[in-house]
Image: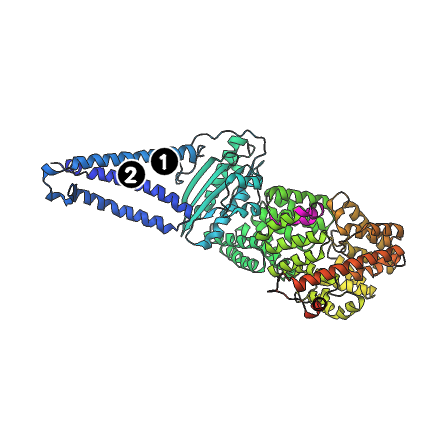
């Protein structure tokens, strides 16, 4: 008897076929389950090893044993006349046919429902799904848009989260360069990380009609990236692909994904047809994969903001440029990290030190490439930090040409344009941020404080509620700003205290809490919020005089610190040391060569400077400064800034300085809380032309009555309903009036 006939008689061949079909189907099901539950790589590897080892065991078992009605027996113990191998064989056939039917169903599902559009041609090493049917053409006229959701990290190490996030952001940046395609910015799309909402709902919130999602599994030097493009209007998959490669191929994978998406959108929406294949946007590459990983980690930390994260980002990015000195994106991001660690951002670096650290890396990035949005963004941020405002706007526009979804640059340019009085540009960017990045906490917070709080406070509070889970300190400050606009000082202070607990080390933002407490006549409370807070707590000329030495030392110790120099100039101004005030303000103004303002965005400094120039006999200089402020006021006329308290306040002071007493009094009569004036400002020289007017005295009485009422409400809140008793307590003497009232 031949070996083949004996193998057939003992059902060895049938067992082999049934085992192979069963194993293949099991692997498909398990792979799908493991991908969805985020199981580590070793689970699948173990299963494959078990199945591989089990195959020869099954073959040997089928050869050596036979299933009989009495159970399993050795083949040699079964009489040939009693053998039922034919019956067993038929059963194996039925099982195999059933498994093949399930396999056919799987193939049918995958081809019809999983990958509905033919996959664009890829390199042979990519594992492609079966060719699907053509997706139906879109019938709406909405412009093409896409959101890149953060790819799921399926690696066994949760610390690899930065890598999957980095891959997603790289793809987003490349897709943003495709002509006619609007891409939702990172800060909005990444808010859906771990969110189980359906694609259509996410797309509606992001205001896009396509979504790219996927997963990343990294094990050692092996990489599996799965990506799929979905039409949000119907849930149809336009394209999908799985890539199993070496880590060094990560750049090619990203280029292939972006090219495939562009091709899929081009077929259905005529997107990017004018872009030649050779000019298609590509990911910037490095030959050193360790440098790329350090770059992704550094950029991930920059996006977290905060001093600690930025300090760690510097370490990672320094490692990246050390491993690959020719990797331009790493140089650009390192410059951004250094600049964000300046004293007026998230660190304590002086301006000269920031320039010394950041500028060489910006220069190196441009030596390597002139078409890096990150390099232009770094140049924009540094220029803004050193007060080269016009250059900052120009550099930001270059960055946005290369990456229209670069939301950080939009924010930097918007703030710079606002500071120098280019309000049309700033509000145009504010609305553009709402379109590109509708869920950005920075964009929404700016929208509230610049417009929504004045036009719809209830909606502003609703937006602030949405910001709190994303960024508690920013959410609470947004509430505080809105409550202040509503004239609710106690509510505003309550929100500000919550922000203080969320981020007690953010001195620049907590400065607003200091000024609020000073306005209410609570300087002792304000002065202990952070180490330098006491420098800002003077409420009258005598207190300014007492603090002058400390303020002067602080300014001398930090020559580039804008806050210290401005408060020093004001201390001189309100103590009658006008020559020193004029010289100090002149030094501050010299730091802003691109504008006539003394301090952009703070018109009162320019008005005080105009008074000082006139007092010194420089009528021409005073007139030029007043003319600048009047032009700035006029530029605000067609914007929501006319609703800001400062708009009427600046008009009052200008009218006072020009001797237009009736106009100033008429404006004062129309004003109602809230006001940003502190008591000592109303007692200062700017209001001397109005001092003897009954209308001004009546205004002061109304203002003081509102301050007194607000002070009582704030003290009651702090002493009886303190929102942060675990982080801060009011002074006992502050609460004495409340305690006495309760005792009576």
Q: Quadrant of residue 620?
A: bottom right
* Image location (x, y in percent) of residue 88: 19, 37
For label 1, the residue is 106
Q: Is residue 417 left or right of residue 125?
A: right
* Image location (x, y in percent) of residue 387: 70, 54
Question: Which of the pair 139/317 is nearer the observer?
Answer: 139
In the rendered view, tell whether residue 135 sits above or below residue 523. Answer: above
Is 474 a magenta residue? no
Q: Is any part of residue 599 visible from this angle?
A: yes
Q: What stretch is highlighted in magenta?
A: 439-458
Is 442 a magenta residue? yes
* Image location (x, y in percent) of residue 728: 63, 65
Question: Which of the pair 238/732 is nearer the observer?
Answer: 732
For label 2, the residue is 21
Residue occupying the point 62% across, 62% down: 724
Residue occupying the point 16% across, 41% down: 69
Q: In which quarter of the image is residue 472?
A: bottom right
Q: Is residue 714 left or right of residue 282?
A: right
Q: How many residues crowd around disc 1 within 10 Å: few (fewer than 14), some, or many (20 or more)?
A: some
């Amino acid at each position: 008897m031949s070996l083949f006939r004996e193998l057939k008689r003992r059902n060895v061949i049938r067992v082999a076929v049934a085992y192979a079909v069963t194993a293949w189907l099991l692997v498909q099901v398990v792979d799908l389950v493991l991908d969805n539950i985020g199981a580590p790589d070793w689970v699948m590897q173990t299963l494959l090893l078990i199945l591989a080892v089990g195959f020869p065991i099954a073959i040997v078992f089928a050869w050596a044993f036979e299933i009989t009605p009495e159970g399993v027996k050795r083949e040699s113990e079964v009489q040939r006349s009693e053998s039922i191998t034919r019956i067993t064989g038929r059963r194996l056939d039925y099982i195999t046919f059933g498994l093949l039917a399930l396999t056919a169903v799987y193939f049918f599902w995958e081809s019809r429902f999983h990958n509905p559009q033919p996959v664009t041609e890829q390199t042979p090493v990519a594992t492609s799904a079966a060719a699907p049917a053509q997706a139906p053409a879109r019938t709406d006229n909405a412009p093409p848009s896409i959101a890149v959701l953060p790819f799921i990290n399926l690696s066994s190490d949760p610390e690899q989260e930065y890598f999957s996030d980095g891959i997603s952001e790289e793809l987003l940046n490349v897709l943003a360069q495709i002509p006619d395609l609007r891409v939702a910015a990172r800060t909005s799309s990444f808010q859906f990380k771990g969110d189980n909402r359906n694609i259509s709902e996410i797309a509606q919130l992001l205001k896009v009609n396509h979504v790219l999602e996927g997963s990343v599994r990294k094990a050692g030097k092996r990489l599996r990236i799965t990506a799929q493009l979905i039409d949000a209007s119907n849930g149809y998959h336009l394209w999908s692909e799985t890539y199993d490669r070496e880590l060094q191929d990560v750049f090619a994978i990203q280029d292939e994904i972006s090219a495939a998406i562009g091709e899929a959108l081009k077929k259905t929406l005529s997107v990017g047809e004018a872009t030649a294949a050779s000019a298609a946007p590509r990911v910037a590459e490095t030959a050193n994969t360790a440098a790329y990983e350090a770059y992704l980690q550094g950029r991930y930390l920059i996006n977290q903001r905060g001093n600690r994260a930025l300090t760690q980002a510097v370490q990672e990015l320094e490692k990246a440029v050390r491993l690959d000195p020719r990797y331009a994106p790493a140089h650009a991001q390192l410059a951004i990290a250094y600049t964000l660690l300046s004293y007026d951002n998230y660190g304590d670096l002086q301006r000269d030190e920031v320039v010394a650290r950041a500028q060489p890396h910006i220069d190196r990035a441009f030596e390597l490439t002139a078409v890096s949005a990150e390099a232009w963004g770094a140049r924009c941020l540094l220029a803004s930090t050193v007060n080269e405002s016009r250059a900052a706007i120009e550099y930001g526009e270059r960055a946005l040409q290369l990456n229209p979804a670069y939301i950080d640059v939009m924010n930097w340019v918007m703030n710079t344009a606002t500071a120098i009085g280019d309000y049309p540009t700033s509000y145009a960017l504010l609305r553009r941020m709402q379109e590109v990045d509708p869920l950005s906490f920075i964009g929404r917070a700016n929208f509230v404080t610049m417009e929504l709080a004045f036009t719809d406070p209830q909606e502003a509070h609703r937006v602030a509620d949405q910001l709190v889970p994303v960024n508690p300190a920013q959410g609470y400050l947004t509430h505080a700003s809105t409550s202040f606009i509503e004239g609710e000082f106690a509510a505003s202070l309550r929100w500000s205290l919550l922000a203080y607990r969320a981020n007690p080390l953010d001195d620049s933002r907590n400065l607003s809490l200091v000024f609020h407490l000073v306005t209410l006549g609570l300087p002792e409370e304000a002065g202990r919020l952070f180490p330098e807070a006491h420098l800002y707590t003077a409420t009258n000329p005598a207190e300014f005089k007492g603090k002058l030495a400390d303020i002067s030392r602080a300014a001398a110790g930090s020559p580039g610190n804008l806050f210290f120099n401005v408060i020093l100039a004001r201390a001189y101004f309100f103590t009658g040391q006008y020559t020193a005030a004029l010289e100090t303000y002149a030094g501050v103004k010299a730091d802003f060569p691109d504008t006539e303002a003394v301090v952009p965005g703070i018109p009162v400094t320019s008005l005080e400077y105009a008074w000082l120039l006139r007092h010194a006999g420089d009528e021409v200089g005073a007139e030029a400064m007043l003319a600048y402020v009047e032009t700035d006021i006029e530029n605000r006329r067609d914007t929501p800034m006319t609703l800001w308290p400062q708009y009427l306040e600046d008009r009052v002071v200008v009218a006072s300085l020009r001797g237009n007493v009736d106009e100033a009094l008429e404006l004062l009569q129309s004003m109602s809380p809230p006001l940003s004036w502190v008591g000592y400002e109303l007692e200062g020289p700017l209001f001397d032309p109005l001092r003897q007017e009954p209308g001004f005295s009546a205004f002061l009485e109304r203002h003081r009555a509102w301050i007194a009422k607000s002070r009582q409400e704030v003290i009651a809140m702090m002493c009886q309903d303190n929102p942060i008793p675990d982080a801060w307590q009011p002074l006992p003497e502050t609460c004495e009036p409340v305690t006495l009232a309760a005792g009576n």
